[in-house]
Amino acid sequence: MPRQIYVNREGTAIVSDTPESDVTAVRRIKVLHLISSRGVYGAERVVLTLCKYADSERFEQIIGIFRKKKVSGDQLGREAERLGIPVEEILYSTAFDPRQILGLIGIVRRHRPDLIHTHEYKANILGFCLAKIFGLPIVTTVHALHKLRGRAKRELQFSVGLLKYFSAVMPVSGDVRDELQALKVPAEKMVTIKNVPPLTEMRPASGVRSFREEVGVPSDRKLIGFLGRLIPAKGCDQLIHAIANIDKKDRNFSLAVAGDGPERESLEALAEKLGVRDMIHFCGFRSDTEHIYASLDLLVLPSREEGTPLVMLEGMSRGVSVVATKVGGIPDVLKDRVNGLLVPSDDPIALAGAIAESLNKPDETKKRAIEAKRTMAREYDVKTWAKKFEEIYAGIVQ
């Protein structure tokens, strides 16, 4: 018989293989996560990390993934299954294909979740409909608002307007919380839970060599990295402009762009136009991020909008020096000239200066990287982070 949680007459929870005469079994709380995904980027990694580190004796996690038909690849599903997390796909042809609701209804009937946890725009709307149909509580993590801004104003107002009916709204930074409050999301509904990096998995040094060999960067050449979706909010175009603004005598480095998205072709064309295409390696989506971090001399986040980016937290926790823009929750974590360098967004000249300084002053850069790693160890514990979600789940369901 599997180990379960029991509660004795004094109200104390205990874990046992078999119940004693004076205890009552407590069923695990089932949480259905809903997310639209085209890779394993920030929001997806938050979901995976939460499912991995939440107390499996108290909570059962299921991930429902919205995926467009005829679009190849389900990296999130494969990674979840590798971790032993049950996965359900909700396929669709158009953005609000009504068959998605039928698929969601089937998932609820099969798994009987106690609570729905949504991530991002589509999941919020369809998850809300599902919660209403079955009378289930619903919570959401708001990773950032840039996806919402890209839609018609009426749709933005509708999607954010639904959040007042959610049991809890969890922005990932104070900046995102302020934006939600300005959009009339009730303050009493919101609990800010800042992202944390998952625990480091040790990888063999051979992985570092193979990544550099794969992208064609010799061991004596500096390597800077960009990891993320190739969308306007992430600002990869600004990074390419910045590289073009660095003096040619200081261009003794390469850039690895790990990620994919709708801007890839235009970014490659921009690099060609600016004469820096030979310095940039577009790697597409990569799941071996540990090898990439271990290969980098510098991690750059040129974002226009952010919550609390997991890429930054992961890089800092692994001792990689970071240059980032002063947007979203980034300045809450990255302190200029203490554990990284900060520059204004949409300022490729300033970004170029920070990159050149980081590469040309390795001793100072290393000191900031060491302090970044200390910051993560001191202030960002993944198990404490997971417990915050557990408390919210338990408080709502029980």
Image: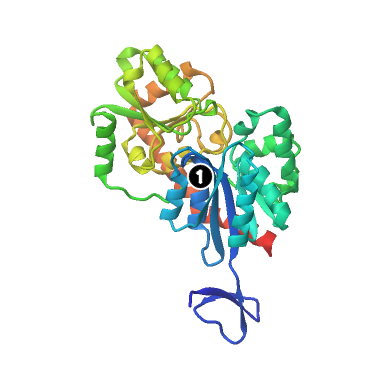
Q: Can residue 381 be seen in this view?
A: no
Residue 51 vs 276, above or below: the answer is below
Tally of numbered discs: 1
**Residue 325, x across and y down, in percent:** 51, 27
Residue closer to the observer: 118 or 21: 118
Residue closer to the observer: 221 or 65: 65
Residue 157 picture quarter: top right
User: For mark 1, does the 10 Å Cα neighbourhood hold few (<14), some (14 to 19), or many (20 or more) residues?
Assistant: many
Q: Which residue is depicted at the point 68% across and 62% down?
A: 397
Q: Which residue is depicted at the point 56% across and 66% down?
A: 58
Residue 143 vs 89, above or below: the answer is above
**Is residue 310 rendered to the left or right of residue 274?**
right
Q: Which residue matches tag 1?
A: 44
Picture colour scheme = rainbow
Residue 233 vs 138, above or below: the answer is above
Residue situated furthest bottom in the rendering: 21
Residue closer to the observer: 152 or 5: 152
- Which image quadrant: the C terminus? bottom right
**Is residue 166 rendered to the left or right of residue 388?**
right
Q: Can residue 34 be seen in this view?
A: yes
Of helix, strand and loop, which one carries label 1? helix
Residue closer to the observer: 363 or 141: 141
**Residue 336, x across and y down, in percent:** 49, 30
Q: Which residue is depicted at the point 36% across and 16% down?
A: 276
Say which amino acid is labelled 1: Glu
**Residue 31, x across and y down, in percent:** 59, 58
